[in-house]
């Protein structure tokens, strides 16, 4: 468990790729697959282990790692805008303050069920999830399970500021 915790994978799925980052191993496809899993609500940790190959793929490896870092930085910048916007609204409660986390907000709006919030957002072309999102025990501890739990909004690399602004404006319509 200590190794998983040190890798940031305690309690999270761990995808282990053995053999290094190189085109013939499909590293770029793996990165896209992990991004897809993140979009679906899972939060896997990707660990790539292995030595050098017979060929020099350092440039390829650097491009893959740079792409991953750029996607992460983009998501986190948008996520901060989302957290600031939701956090400033009276009647909106945000759950979770982990120092390292995926760009996913979990929140409630006073006087509205999570299903109502999700339907309102869907009418405005904003896709979110509502419910316990496989956090059954946590929603019980938080005391929100019986009220429908919460709304979950996740950001990924293809979202932009207009997506976040549209989500914030739609929630503000309900919160006011």
Image (cartoon, rainbow, N blue to C red):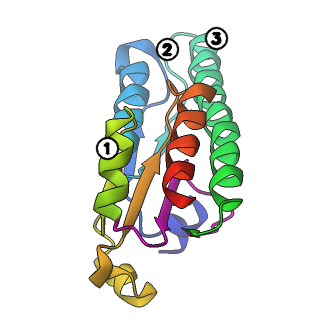
User: On the image, which quarter does residue 135 sit in?
Assistant: bottom left
Membership of 151 in magenta stretch: no
User: On the image, which quarter does residue 146 sit in?
Assistant: bottom left
The main secondary structure of the magenta stretch is loop
Instruction: Report, in whole angstroms, how far the alpha carbon at label 3 lies from the one at label 1.
Output: 30 Å
Residue located 58% across and 56% down the image = 101
Q: Which residue is mark 3?
A: 59
In terms of secondary structure, where does tag 2 sit? loop
Counting from the top left corner in percent of width and height, residue 150 is at 39, 67
Q: Which residues are magenta?
A: 94-113
Residue located 39% across and 67% down the image = 112
Front of the two marks 1 and 2 = 1
Q: Which residue is mark 2?
A: 54
Asked if residue 119 shows in the view, the reply is yes
Of the two numbered discs 3 and 2 on the same chain, state the one appearing first in sequence: 2
Of the two numbered discs 1 and 2 on the same chain, state the one appearing first in sequence: 1
Q: Which residue is mark 1?
A: 40
In terms of secondary structure, where does tag 3 sit? helix
- Mark 3 touches mark 2? (CB < 8 Å): no
- Mark 3 touches mark 1? (CB < 8 Å): no
């Amino acid at each position: 468990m200590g190794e998983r915790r040190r890798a940031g994978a305690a309690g999270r799925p761990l995808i282990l790729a053995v053999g290094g980052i190189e085109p013939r191993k499909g590293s770029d496809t793996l990165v896209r697959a992990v991004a897809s899993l993140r979009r679906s609500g899972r939060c896997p940790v990707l660990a790539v282990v292995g030595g050098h190959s017979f060929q020099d793929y350092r440039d390829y490896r650097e491009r893959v790692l740079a792409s991953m870092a750029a996607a992460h930085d983009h998501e986190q910048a948008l996520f901060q805008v989302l957290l600031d916007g939701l956090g400033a609204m009276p009647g909106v409660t945000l759950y979770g303050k982990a120092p390292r986390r995926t760009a996913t907000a979990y929140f409630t709006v006073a006087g509205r069920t999570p299903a109502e919030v999700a339907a309102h957002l869907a009418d405005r072309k904003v896709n979110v999830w509502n419910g316990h999102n496989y956090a059954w025990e946590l929603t019980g501890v938080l005391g929100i399970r019986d009220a429908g739990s919460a709304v979950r909004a996740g950001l990924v690399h293809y979202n932009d500021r207009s997506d976040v602004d549209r989500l914030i404006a739609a929630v503000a319509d309900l919160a006011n």
